[in-house]
Amino acid sequence: MDDPVDTKILALCQERGAGKSICPSDVAKALVPEGRHWQHLMGRVRQRAIVLARGGAIDILRKGKPVADLDDLRGVIRLRIR
């Protein structure tokens, strides 16, 4: 896996542990130097989270439940290791 976003998503989810989730903004913030703007990474984090979810590595949660339709992903989400 060469994508640093994928690597950071998986690392943060694994650190959090089974049954617990992270916010995609945690990933974006971890990928930029301290004090820098991280918001521009949010779209990329969401895109890569969808790829990882389709591959079975993580779950994308909305209101605490796995999202069934990843093609219609919107709103506030969280990520957890599967």
Image (cartoon, rainbow, N blue to C red):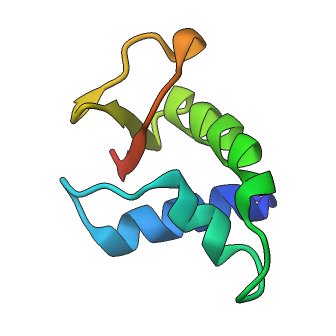
Q: Position of residue 71 (x, y in %)?
A: 59, 11
How many discs mark residues in the rendered view?
0
Instruction: Please indicate whether residue 55 sits to the left or right of residue 43 in the image.
Output: left
Q: Nearer the viewer, residue 3 or 32?
A: 32
Q: Is residue 68 left or right of residue 5?
A: left
- Identify the image quadrant of residue 61: top left
Determine whether, in the image, residue 72 is placed left or right of residue 36.
left
Where the C terminus falls, by quadrant? top left
User: Residue 77, position in %: x, y?
Assistant: 42, 38
Q: Is residue 2 above or below residue 62?
A: below
Q: Residue at x 52, y 66 (%)?
A: 26
Residue 24 as seen in the image, left or right of residue 82: right
Q: Point out residue 72 in the picture as x, y percentages from the top left corner.
A: 54, 10
Task: State which quarter of the image contains the N terminus.
Answer: bottom right
- Residue 76: which quarter of the image? top left
Picture residue at 68% right of the left edge, 42% below the top: 48
Of the pair 15 and 63, the residue shown nearer to us: 63
Residue 76 vertical placement versus 23 (above, below)? above
Please, which residue is most extreme toward the bottom here?
34
Q: Nearer the viewer, residue 68 or 55?
A: 68
Q: Residue at x 76, y 45 (%)?
A: 44
Residue at the (76%, 65%) spot, across then down:
4
- 79 relative to 65, above or below: below
Residue 66 appears at what percent x and percent y? Answer: 30, 27
